[in-house]
Image: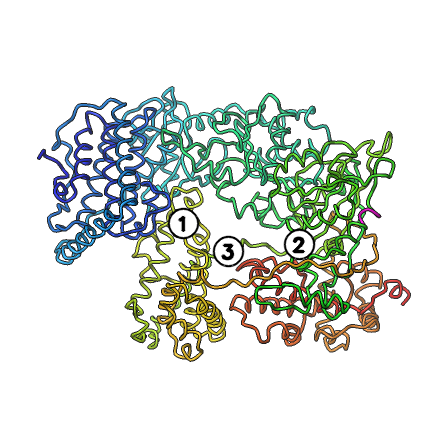
Amino acid sequence: MPQSNFAFIATEWPQIYEYALRAEEYIFSDPKAAGVYARNAAEELVYYIFALKQLRQPQDNNLAGHLQDPDFSALAPRAIRQKIDLLRKRGNRAAHPGHKITTQDAHAAVTDLHHVLIWAAHTFSTQPDTIPLDAEFDPKIATSRTPMRHEELRKLAVKVQQEHEEFQRKLEESAAASRAKDEEIARLQTQLAAAQAAKTTEFHRDLDEATTRTELIDEMLAEAGWVITKEHTAGGAQEEVPLRGPDGETRYADYVLWDDDGTPLAVIEAKRTSRSESQGQEQALLYAEALEAQYGVRPIIFCTNGLSTLLWEESAGYPPRPVLSFLTKDELQWRHHTTRRRRPLSDQPVKSQIVDRPYQERVIRSVGETFSAKHRAALLVMATGTGKTRTVIALVEQMLQAGWVKRVLFLADRKALVRQAVNAFRDHLPEQPPVNLLEEKDPDGRIYVSTYPTMLNQIEQYRQDGSRLYGPGFFDLVIVDEAHRSVYQKYRSIFEWFDSVLLGLTATPVDQVDRNTYQLFGQQPGVPTDAYSLDEAIADGYLVPARGLSIGTEFLSRGVRYDELSEEEKDTWDQLEWDEDGEIPDQVAASEMNRRLFNTDTVDKVLAELFEHGIKVAGGDVLGKTIIFAINQRHADFIDQRFNLQYPEHAGRFARVITSKMEHSQRLIDAFGSRQPVSEPQIAITVDMLDTGIDVPEVVNLVFFKQVFSKTKFWQMVGRGTRKRPELFGPGAPKTEFLILDAGGNLEFFNADVPEPERTRPKSLSERLFQRRLELLTALDTHESGGTPDLLHHKVPMKYDDAGHSPASFRADLVHSARVHVAGMNPQNVQVRPHRALVERFSEPEAWEKLTHQEALELAERLGRLPSESLKEAEEAKSFDLTVLRAQLAQVTGDGPTLAVQRNRVQDIAESLLAKTHVPEVKAQAALLEEIREDTWWEQVTYLMLETVRRRLRGLTGFADKTRWKPVQTDFEDTLLTAEEVALRPITPGTDPAQFRLRAERFLRQNVDNLAVQKLRHNKQLTEQDLRSLEQLLVEAGLGTREDIRAVTEDAQGLGVFIRSLVGLDQAAAQAAFAGFTQDTNFTADQLHFINQIIGYLTANGVMEPAQLFDSPFSDYGQADQIIGEEGLAEVVDILSEIRNRAQPPSTDPSQEETA
C-alpha cells in the first residue's frame, strides 16, 4: 500500500480512500485533478453517511442537496459542512476548463478533506480509537502522479457521477439488493454502536474558525470571479499584501484586488467571525491611503468577517453600507470609472424626444438631485396615465449619457407589464435594445426587464466557472414598478442583493402610500421625491376625469335571506346542495354573493344597467370599450355565460373573459387594445389581470362587480379609464370622461377615506409551526427554571409511551425540529445570506441549551420566513402538528380555553378518521382514536400524551374529511337599487381635521353621560332627534358652526359614526353584538383571538370597516377568510355593518337634516 495521509480509512472505506489518495498524489502535478478527486471523496463520504444513518434522500439528489438536508446538518458540525461545501465548489470549478486551480487551491482542498475524514472516521467508523486526531496533513508523504489531460479529467467527473447514478438505479430496481443493503446497514450500525460506545477518545480538534472564515471570504471572491494569488498579479486577488504606512511601519492588508494594469481596485480588511465587520474600517482606511500613495489610485474598501460585509466608496463620497458579496473586476473598474468621469446630472439635458411634458422633466430633475446628494433611493408618485414608464426611460437615458449607470434593471410584477416595458424601451431608446429576461436565456445588454420571481431565480444561478450570473454590482440602477410594501415583503432579497441605487414608482396617491414604502425608499412619510397627482393631470388636460354611478342590487347590498324569499324560491333553496354535510344555511351574506351563491337575475340586472347607463360610441349605437372587474374566475365565467344568453346577437365575441387562466390571453389583450373605438372584444371581463399597466385609451366604462379593499389596487383600476383618446366619438369629439359603474360600494368606501392600516405579511404554515415550537420551548424552560413539579416529573401512561417520552427527551425532540428547520437553510441563498450569522449559530446544538425569550423572538422574526429544506412535508401533517403544538403550549401554560378549542379540533379529526377504519393504517390506531374522542381522556392530559397522539396520527390526517361548501347557482328575483351619481373624492389631501377631532374628543369624554352619547356607547339605535341634539351639543360647546361640523364629519359618514369613533363602544355591548356568532361553536384559539381582536378594536374605535379585517393585526395569522371561513367572514361583516348602522338614524335624509 502506498504511503498516504489517509491510510487510517484504507481498510474500512476503500473507495473513499482511493479518491483521497489520488487527490493528494495530484496536488503538485495536476491541481485540477486533485480538486476533482477531493470532491469525489467528500461526495462518497456524504452518501455513505446517508446510507449508514438511513436518512431520507433529499429532493435535489446531488451533493449540494445532501449538504442542505436538515437531518445531515444535525449530524455534522457547521465547520465540517462548510469544508465539504468548499470541496464541492472547488471540485466543480476544477472540472471546467475556463477556471484556474492553483497548487495552493489544491493543497487547501486536500487539507480540508483530511480534516473532514478524521472527523468522519472518529464519528462513524468501527475503530474510532485508532484515528489520528492530532495528525496534520503532510503533502510530502504521497507520491506525485503524472498530470491528467483535460479530457481525462472531464471523463473522470462524468464517470463518478454515472457510477453513483447507476448504483442508485440498481438499488431502486432490486428488492433483493435493497434487502441486502438493509442487512449490511444493520450489521454496520451494530458494529458502529458498539465501537462508538467503547471509544475512549473525543474529537476535540480545533475546527480552526479563522481558517474557515478565510475560506468563506475566498469563496465569495471566487463567486465574484477572482483568482487568489500570493504574488502581485495583474487582475488577481492577492493575499497578505505588505504596505508601508506613513509612520514607516509595514502592515499586511488581508487582500488587495488588482486591476489589469496592476493598480489597486479594492482592499479587503478581514476580521474574525466573532468580531463586527465594522471594526476594521479605520485599518482599511490606512491601507487605502498607503495604496493610493504608492499607485496613485484610491481603492474601494471592503470590511468583512466572512459572514457580513461592508462596502465603503469613501472616495466617491458614500458612507459604508452592507453588501452580500464582493464585486467582480469589471464592476469595480466601472465604479472607479464612474467616480472619476461621470458628469453632474444637473448638467445633462433630458431628452425631449422621449418626454415633453414639464412635470416629467421636473420629476427627473428631482431624482437627479436626490442621487447627486448621495442618497441611494428615490420614490416617484405619478398617477396612472401620466407616463411613468416614459419618464423613467428618459431618466435612464440621462444617467447613461452622464456616465452614472452601465446596466439597469426594470422590475414588474406581471409578464404583460414586462412585455409592455420592453416595447416602451425599444420604442423610445432604440440605441439600447432591452433584454427580456423572461425570454432571453443568454442575455447581454444595458437594460434588463424582468418579473420579480424570475429575477429571484436568476440571482441564484452560477456560470460554469463558479461565478454568479448576477453579482451584487451587476446593476447600477434598479427600478421598481408599482412599489408598495407587499412587493418588498415578498422580494426584499432582490433589493438587498443588488448594490445599486433604487427608484420606486407608484400610482397610489401621496396621502395613501403606506409609511413602510416611504421608509424603503428613504423618504419621510407623505413626502416622496416628487409627485404628480391625478387631480393635477386632469387640471392640466393630460387625463380625463371619472363620473361615478352606484348601481347596486338588494342581494349585492344585503345578501339573500331565506325568510324573505317566495315559497317557490324557498323550495329551490331547500333542494340546493350547499355542502358535503347537507347543512342548509338560512342566509347568504352580501360578501358571499358571487363566491358561494351565483344568482342569474343579479348578473342580468347589472349587465342591463351597463347597457342603459354606459357610455356609447359609433354615434351612440355601440357600447364603448368596457372592463368588468369580477371577483374570481368562476364569477367571470358566470358573467360571460349570462351575457351570451342575454345578448346572443353578438355571437360570443363582443364580451370575452381575459384572465391569466385563459389560453392565448395576450392575444385577447392585444385585440381588446386595438386602438379602434369598436373592435371585438368590446367588453373585457377580467380578474386581477387588466387592473394595472394595460394601456387602452378607448376604455370609457369600468364596472366594479366586486368589493376592493386595497387603496393601491383601487386607484390602479380607476387608472384604466383616465387616458385621453382624441376623436373617440368622431372628428373633433375626443374622450372627455369615463364612467365607473360601481356594484360593490367602492366609491362610497374610498370616498370615506378610511385609514388603511399597515398590511403585514401573512405567515405560512411552516413559519407558524416554527414560531409555536419556539414558544413551547421557552415556556418549558420558564416552567423548569421555576421548578414546576408537574412538568419536571411528568409520567406518561405506559400504553402511550411508545416513544419513550420524558420531559428531557421531548425537549430534545422539540429542539431537533426547530434546529433542523434552521439547519435546512442554505447560507448561499440570497434570502438567507443577510441572516447567515444567526443561521449558523442556531444550526449548532449548543445554541439551544437555554433559549431566552428574546432569542426566540429574534429567531421567529428573522428566520421564520426563510426557505428551508425542512418544509417539504404534507400540509395536512403540518397542520395537525400545529394543532397539537397549540394544545401542548396551552397545557404547559395553563390556558384552559385554548386547550379546549384544540381538543375539539383533535376530536373532530379523530371522529372523521374512525369512519375510515377500512384503511389499514387508520385501523391500527383505532383504539387511540376511540379514546381521544372521549372527553374523559382529556381530563388528565399532559403535553407528553399529546406528543404521542401527534406522532401516531400526523401521517393519517390526509384521510380525514375536509368539509367544504359548494358554490350554488340560483335564479331568484333580485331588486335594483336606484342608480345614484357618486362624485369621486378629490385625491389630493384636504384640510387636516385632526385639531377638531382632538377638541371634540376631549369635550365628549367630559360629557359621556349625555343620553345620545350613551346610546352610541352601548350600541343602541340612534334617532334623528339624537343626531340633532348631538350637533347642538357641539355647537353650544363652541367647537364650530353647523356647517363646520358637517364638513368635518362628512368623511366619517355622518356625525353619529364620527362621535362613536371618538367615544368608542362599551366592551359589553361589543361582546353582545358577537354573542350569537360565537355561542355553541367550536372555534379554534386563532379564531377566538381574531374575534377578540375585533371586539377590542370596536371598544377603542367604535366602528370598523370590513376592509380592516384583511390588515394587521387581524391578518397576522392569515387572511380573514382563511381564519374563520368565508361564511364566518360574511357574518362578521354583517355584524360590523349593523354596529355602524346603529350609529346612524334608520333613514337619514340629508335634506331633512339641512331643514332642521
Is 283 one of the magenta-colored residues?
Answer: no
Residue at image x 21%, y 37%? 111
Q: Residue furthest right?
A: 1155
Q: Earlier in the sequence, mark 2 or mark 3?
A: 2
Frontmost residue, 832 versus 365: 832
Q: Earlier in the sequence, mark 3 or mark 1?
A: 3
Measured in 3D between alpha carbons, the distance from the residue under mark 3 to the one under mark 1, in whole angstroms, is 15 Å
Q: The N terminus is located in which quarter?
A: top left
Residue 466 locus on image (x, y percent): 36, 32
SS category of the residue bearing label 1: loop
Q: Hey, which quadrant is residue 558 in on the image?
A: bottom right
Which residue is denoted by mark 2 in the rendering? 709
- Name the colouring of the figure: rainbow
Magenta-tinted stretch: 609-613
Q: Earlier in the sequence, mark 1 or mark 2?
A: 2
Which residue is denoted by mark 1 in the rendering? 868
SS category of the residue bearing label 3: loop
Look at the numbered discs 3 and 1 and tell me whether their residues touch, using CB distance below 8 Å: no
Measured in 3D between alpha carbons, the distance from the residue under mark 2 to the one under mark 3, in whole angstroms, is 20 Å
